[in-house]
Image (cartoon, grey):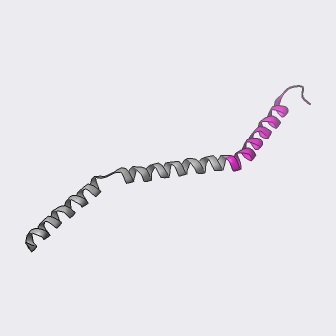
């Protein structure tokens, strides 16, 4: 009886480990979590630093256009 119980326990635990290893839902959830975090960091960085970068870009373009436009002196 003891041997049969330990054999059944071993088979059950083997099935449990096999089903755990075959389940990929947790890995997919982690990947989606990482992707969502990366998108959030990108949006936050654009919100914090994007305005100054765009302002600098437009100032450079504007000053170059003013310098290179004939008759603007």
From the viewer's side, name the closer residue of 40 and 46.
Answer: 40
Residue located at (19% from left, 62% from top): 12
Residue located at (60% from left, 48% from top): 42
Describe residue 44's horizontal placement relative to residue 38 as left or right: right
Figure check: 62 above or below 47? above
Describe residue 40's horizontal placement relative to residue 54 as left or right: left
From the viewer's side, name the closer residue of 48 and 62.
Answer: 48
Figure check: 68 above or below 29? above
Describe residue 15's horizontal placement relative to residue 54 as left or right: left
Q: Position of residue 62 (x, y in %)?
A: 81, 35
Q: Main secondary structure of the magenta part?
A: helix
Residue located at (75% from left, 47% from top): 52
Q: Position of residue 60 (x, y in %)?
A: 78, 40
Q: Position of residue 37 (x, y in %)?
A: 54, 52
Query: Which quarter of the rendering shows the C terminus?
Result: top right
| Residue that sits furthest to the bottom in the current view | 2
Describe residue 24's horizontal placement relative to residue 46 as left or right: left
Residue 59, magenta (yes or no): yes
Span colored in magenta: 47-73
From the viewer's side, name the closer residue of 20 and 73.
Answer: 20
């Amino acid at each position: 009886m003891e041997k049969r119980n330990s054999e059944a326990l071993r088979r059950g635990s083997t099935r449990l480990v096999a089903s755990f290893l075959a389940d990929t839902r947790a890995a997919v959830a982690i990947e989606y979590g990482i992707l969502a975090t990366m998108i959030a960091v990108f949006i936050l960085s654009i919100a914090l630093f994007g305005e100054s970068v765009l302002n600098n870009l437009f100032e450079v373009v504007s000053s170059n256009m003013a310098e290179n436009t004939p008759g603007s002196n």
